[in-house]
Image (cartoon, rainbow, N blue to C red):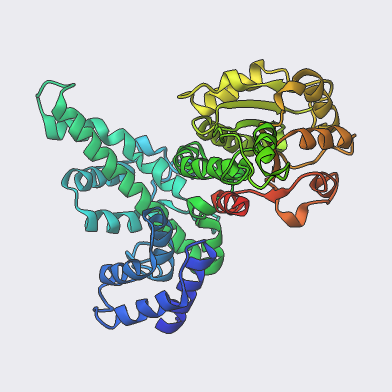
Amino acid sequence: MASLVDRHTGFVAELRRAGLPVSVAEGLDAVRALQAIDLLDRESLRAAYAATVVKRPQHRPTFDTLFDLWFPAAVGAGAGAPAGRGARTLGDDGRPVPPALDPRVQDRRGELAELLLSGDDAGLRQFARTAVAEYGQTPGQESWFSSGVLTALSPETLMARLLNAVLGGQERGGMAERVARRTFRDRIARFQDLVAGEVRRRIAEDTGVERTARIAVRPPLERLDFASASRAEMEALRREVYPLARKLASRLVQRQRHGRRGRLDFRRTVRASLASGGVPLTTHHRPRRPHKPELVVLCDASDSVSAFAHFTLLLTFALREQFSKVRAFAFIDATDEITKYFAPGTDVVDAMARLAAEADLVWITGRSNYGHAIKVFDDRYRDAVTSRTSLLILGDARSNYGELSLPIVRSMVDRARHAYWLNPEPRDRWDTGDSAASRYGELLPMFECRNLTQLAAFVEELA
């Protein structure tokens, strides 16, 4: 058993590893907060830590998961139930009877229904421990799984029983049923979370807290790799990208200004110099005409960066409102304009499905070929890049050892007002294998961009 000091230092270190910004001072604040609470009251302990080290609501799920691992509610069996033995009725062949025919399982389902009906959270927590002890292990195996518990008890299928108990003979389909369904859906989700937490606790006792934490905890949204984001996380990323897009647009506008005054008005300056013997003592400038810049996004849509392409399109959506014109192009070994697939309000996943089915991105092999894709872009869409254009290329610069079309890229960069390359690969993988990151990086600035934190750093770099 680790001491409280060891648990505190390990817990804070794991929070930092998971991406939560916990400073040394905040760790000391947590220690001071522990002096003001009853250490045997676990929820007070949780609240004290949360108040001192959690800064954003998005970090709270990660915090709770790690807190439950480092300060578990129980040790060992917890509920005193035998792990995975005697919980299922065996048939004549020695195998467990299917849950629907097993009277023991049906009794457990009845207990679960009563707890869901009453909303007894403490009882539900204790029941989850018992259920994991009974159904969380497959006979003959040492690992723990949530799936065994949820398959045996099938809490979602209890909805009809719960609604009948609450509504009785009332007419269905009204407000009362919708409220009841939402309530029971939340309670079922709570039970599933308790089961998952208990399974993690059991695994942590068997394999170690640090190892379990690294497997079970996803990084916070701002440090989540775009390539591993789920659909729900993509929706959250979309909301976070908009402020960064506005800041990116403002940075690019600032970079294209020619100081506070417009360009030199040569004719007016010469005319004014006649009064001083031809010496231009006073210069005249044309009025500065502010305008929104144009943006061209060139995105690698091959399988190796398909998830990153989702983020690319999120960024494109967000930048639409900040630029006078946004044109998006995707490529694999050929290039096609995809602007039409991403009208405002379009679901990114649906747009990606249309893109995969309709866009002309494959030339021969369907494998990344940056050289040929860039040639196609230059042949078909050369007029897209002008002196008013900010060019943004997104891809891993891996061309399967094919040509790179570096002279064309140089020409595009020279024509554009600004040009930048965002690479979703870790920097230590650049120039390994078929990566041509440095060769492209000699022509235009290349930035590592795998998450929101790195995107924000790129935006700040432009300042």
Which of 199/392 is in front? 392
370 left or right of 160? right
- Point 51% across, 67% down: residue: 16
- Point 17% across, 28% down: residue: 177
The residue most toward the left is 169
Q: Examine the image and state in which quarter residue 400 appears.
A: top right
Which of 239/172 is in front? 239
User: Residue 305 in the image: x percent, y percent?
Assistant: 68, 38
221 left or right of 73? right
Task: Count the marks.
Answer: 0
- Point 28% across, 83% down: residue: 35
- Point 53% across, 43% down: residue: 250
Q: Examine the image and state in which quarter residue 368 appears.
A: top right
Q: Is residue 128 above or below residue 368?
A: below
User: Residue 383 in the image: x percent, y percent?
Assistant: 74, 21
Which of 331/41 is in front? 331
User: Residue 293 in the image: x percent, y percent?
Assistant: 59, 33
